[in-house]
Amino acid sequence: MKHVGVGVGIGIGIGIGAGAQVQRGPRGSGGRERSGRGRCGPGRCIVVFVGLAIGLCGRHGCGQEGGPDAPAPSLRPVTLAGCVRLALDNNFQLKAHRLAAGASATGVAAAAGAFDPVLRSRGSYGDQTSPTASALEGTQAPGGSASGGFTGNLGPGFPASTTTNDSPAVPRRQSYSWDLSLEKKFATGTEVAVSYSFERLKTNQYFATINPSYTDQVQFHVTQPLLRGGWFTANLAGLRQSENQRQMAREQLRTATDDLVFNVQQTYWNLVYALENLDVTRESLRLAETLKRDNLEKFKAGTMTRLDVTQADFEIATRKNEVLRASAAVKNTVDRLRQYVDPEGFDADPAEEWHPIDRPLQRGEKAPPFAAALAEAFVHRGDWREGQLAYENAKINEDDYRNQVLPKVDLTYSLRYNGLGGNASDPMRDVLRAEYDSWSVGFLLEWPLGNQSARANYLRAVLDRRRVQADLEELRARIHLEIREAVREINTTFDTITQTREALRFAREQLKGEQARLEVGKSTSYQVLDIQEDLAQAQINERRALLDHMIARAQLERSKGTLLRYFGLAAAPRPGGEERRGDGP
């Protein structure tokens, strides 16, 4: 896709001189190699660039159409807030944490399922024939009771099988049964069951007075554990742990979001510094080339030696090396920022240039009191609340295994209503009238001898709870250290801003005085260039101090767990809208 845009730029430059000695700048991360005779600085000039880009933007930003020979690179203006929003929407690691938080919510529903009522139903048909050994189990002859036919064992003194006719019959029972039950477990461990059963029985036995017969039965059964498995602690352990696991996943998501937002901000300000450092090195190279031309003309005129030209050549080679390194640093920083905000942008235009729009504040702020920042951290930090929840889960697990060591003592109660009739409606009428009832009360005792498995599980739970408590204490100490260092860093960078501005003011005054001396012939151009280099160093130091102060402020908010609120982003709500407070387990 073609990128089309319009750009307007204003550049202001201050020249800096050249030198003969090469030395690494003061900062390992953003410093540059510099040259000077007795003193060194990171560059030769400071360039302030104000750009405005207006155009048609593609997926990755706005671009400019150049001339026919070499098209200008595409331009992508970026803001800090825009980068944060894109990172929150696109970052792969954050998406994984969101999915994990969603998956943890299913554990709560699974644990609550232990208290769901259970409906059961069962039906059967049976047809049974069997030999009989009792006269009372005799059967009707095939001719029926009216014919007087009887087959059966009439007792001592009679044959094993006495038949009043020539067609013996075998006892037969045909039954249809169906039952329906509803069972429910409560948080106290109480188990309640209500059941209804129906049976239709038809037989050919002679003494069956109701044939076919219909039987209905309604039963209520209650079981209450008194020790093991009883009451709220044991039965709500799984549900409480699942709810804590869900909240822990949300806190992990919050912590990951804080880390991502901080990394985006830090990388964004590093990009600002890298671009400014690149401008300085390019202007330094231009000044070195100008110095070489001037020295070469003076050498031809006989007012300078070959050594002055050689020093200029050395300075050009040094500045080219610095430009290459500064340019690579910009590209590397852009790649890191793109990895956060657009991780799928592998096909991005390699010539695309990112131009940060936001600039650091020109004023610093002192850090809040240490005690206030520490108290806020123990309220808002996601990892601290996660540690508290982990300790709570370990304590729940310990209590649950302590309960499993106890013997099993259950109290049972059963109430049953029965009904019988020759048609389907008669037995239900008996049940509703409660004419035939029975009840029972009992207990169940189970006491494992030795109980080694339960005791070992309980001991392991105790040790695990102590381990989690030690981890929580270590986290408390780490939070104290992080808050103290963050507060100290803010105050240090605040004072550094003041000192670098003082140094910048002195460097400007020194340059002004040295230029005045040069005009009257009391100084040399090399001394003026050396002081201009100090001015550039002072300007870079001031800019670095401002950026470090912005990063330090974000680091404090991150250490307190309030970085999302600092950026005006909504944080994950807490259960019941309450803060989880406390300084220890």
Image: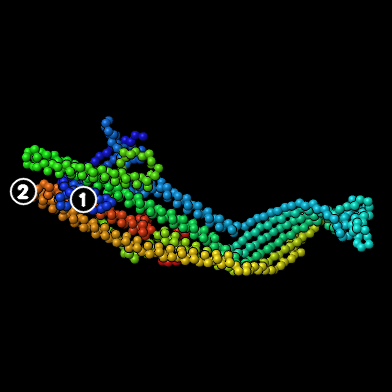
Q: Quadrant of the C terminus?
A: bottom left
Give the residue at the far top of this rendering: 68
Identified at 94% across, 62% down, the residue is 157
**Residue 403 can be seen in this image:** no
* Residue at position x 88%, y 57% in the image: 138
* Marking on residue 520: 2
Decide which of 165, 213 is in the foreground and name it. 165
* Residue 55 versus residue 574 in the image, above or below: above
| Amino acid found under the numbered disc labelled 1 | Gln
Binning the other alpha carbons within 10 Å of mark 2 as few (below 14), some (14 to 19) or many (20 upward) gives few
How is the rendered protein coloured? rainbow
Q: Position of residue 556 (x, y in %)?
A: 33, 58
303 relative to 491 in the view: left or right:
left
Which residue shows up at 58% across the image and 65% down it?
A: 453
Locate residue 238, reporting x and y percent: 54, 60
Q: Nearer the viewer, residue 200 or 254?
A: 254
Vertically, is 480 above or below 67?
below
**Cβ atoms under marks 2 and 1 closer than 8 Å:** no
Residue 141, given in percent of the width and then of the height, sits at: 90, 52
Secondary element at tag 1? strand
Under mark 2, the amino acid is Val
Q: In the displayed image of the protein, which residue is found farthest to the left?
A: 520
The quadrant in which residue 7 appears is top left
- As measured in the structure, the alpha-carbon distance from the residue carrying label 2 to the one carrying label 1 is 32 Å
Q: Earlier in the sequence, mark 2 or mark 1?
A: 1
Q: Residues within 10 Å of mark 1 (few under 14, many from 20)?
A: some
